[in-house]
Image (tube, grey):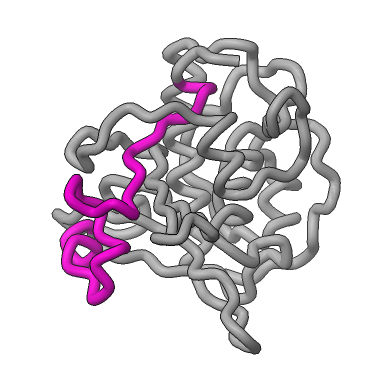
């Protein structure tokens, strides 16, 4: 899967003020498909450089009309037969009392989502898993996908971008939940006993919060 051009404009995002069943269903389908698709994309869209930018991309693009022109702009050779979210006013990310095109992992958690559980078993597709370093200086976010949208598997998956480190630009990873629970670094395990794991969070859009 290759990307043919970069869509820089952030306008045209579509979503009504509150999430009814139609919006929630379509959003979850598209968000998970887009987030997982990044694992297959080479090269990635230039805006996807760290964990939060992957999440912002999947969120924003899930709420657009998914036309053939849209698919060409991002280099998708095919699209799933998912319903589009119903049309509505433009939607941005919240950062305190402001609305912006950008929100890092900390602001995504604090102002754009609500915690639903400390138990991974309560996660639903399109929910987010947040982590914070022991010193509180860095934050990380993963998307919970549930089943893969691209291959047959009995496993549930998560997807995230590692973020850059030195001269290494980082990469998108898509481990199974079982693999994540046995991550060699315990701070990345989404378990209740891990102080670095902040919990399962759900988008305000899905919670009916503005």
Instruction: Quadrant for residue 159, please give it.
Output: bottom left
How many discs mark residues in the rendered view?
0
Specify whether 87 is left or right of 184: right
Q: Could you say where residue 191 lies in the image, as x and y percent from the top left? A: 20, 50
Q: Could you say where residue 57 lies in the image, as x and y percent from the top left? A: 63, 49
Q: Is residue 179 above or below residue 70?
A: below
Instruction: Quadrant for residue 84, please give it.
Output: top right
Comparing 178 with 84, the one in front is 178
Residue sitting at the far front: 135
Comparing 110 with 135, the one in front is 135
Tell me, yes or no, whether the highlighted magenta stretch contains residue 205: yes
Instruction: Quadrant for residue 200, please give it.
Output: top left
Q: Is residue 116 above or below residue 179?
A: above
Residue sitting at the far bottom: 167
Q: Is residue 167 above or below residue 69?
A: below
Specify whether 57 is left or right of 141: right
Quadrant (top left/top right/bottom left/bottom right) for the N terminus: bottom right
Q: Residue at x 64, y 42 (%)?
A: 61
Q: Could you say where residue 150 lies in the image, as x and y percent from the top left? A: 36, 57
Q: Residue at x 53, y 48 (%)?
A: 79
| Residue 162 appearing in the image | yes
Comparing 100 with 110, the one in front is 110
Quadrant (top left/top right/bottom left/bottom right) for the C terminus: top right
> Which range of residues does the magenta coloring cover?
177-206
Specify whether 180 is left or right of 110: left
Tell me, yes or no, whether the highlighted magenta stretch contains residue 207: no
Q: Residue at x 29, y 60 (%)?
A: 151
Q: Could you say where residue 174 lies in the image, as x and y percent from the top left? A: 36, 65
Q: Residue at x 45, y 18 (%)?
A: 207
| Residue 156 appearing in the image | no
């Amino acid at each position: 899967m290759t990307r043919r051009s970069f869509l820089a404009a952030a306008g045209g995002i579509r979503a009504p003020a509150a999430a009814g069943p139609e919006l929630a269903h379509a959003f979850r389908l598209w968000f998970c498909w887009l987030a997982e698709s990044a694992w297959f994309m080479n090269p990635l869209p230039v805006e996807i450089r760290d964990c939060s930018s992957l999440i912002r991309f999947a969120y924003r693009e899930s709420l657009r009309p998914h036309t053939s022109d849209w698919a060409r702009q991002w280099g998708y050779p095919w699209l799933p037969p998912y319903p589009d979210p119903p049309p509505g006013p433009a939607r941005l990310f919240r950062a305190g009392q402001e609305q912006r095109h950008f929100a890092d992992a900390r602001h995504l958690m604090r102002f754009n989502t609500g915690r639903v559980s400390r138990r991974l078993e309560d996660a639903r597709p399109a929910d987010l898993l947040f982590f914070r370093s022991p010193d509180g200086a860095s934050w990380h976010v993963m998307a919970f996908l549930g089943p893969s949208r691209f291959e047959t598997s009995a496993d549930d998956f998560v997807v995230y971008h590692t973020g850059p480190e030195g001269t290494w630009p980082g990469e998108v990873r898509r481990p199974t939940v079982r693999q994540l629970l046995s991550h060699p670094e315990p701070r990345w395990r989404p378990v209740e006993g891990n102080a670095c794991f902040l919990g399962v969070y759900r988008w305000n859009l899905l919670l009916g919060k503005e």
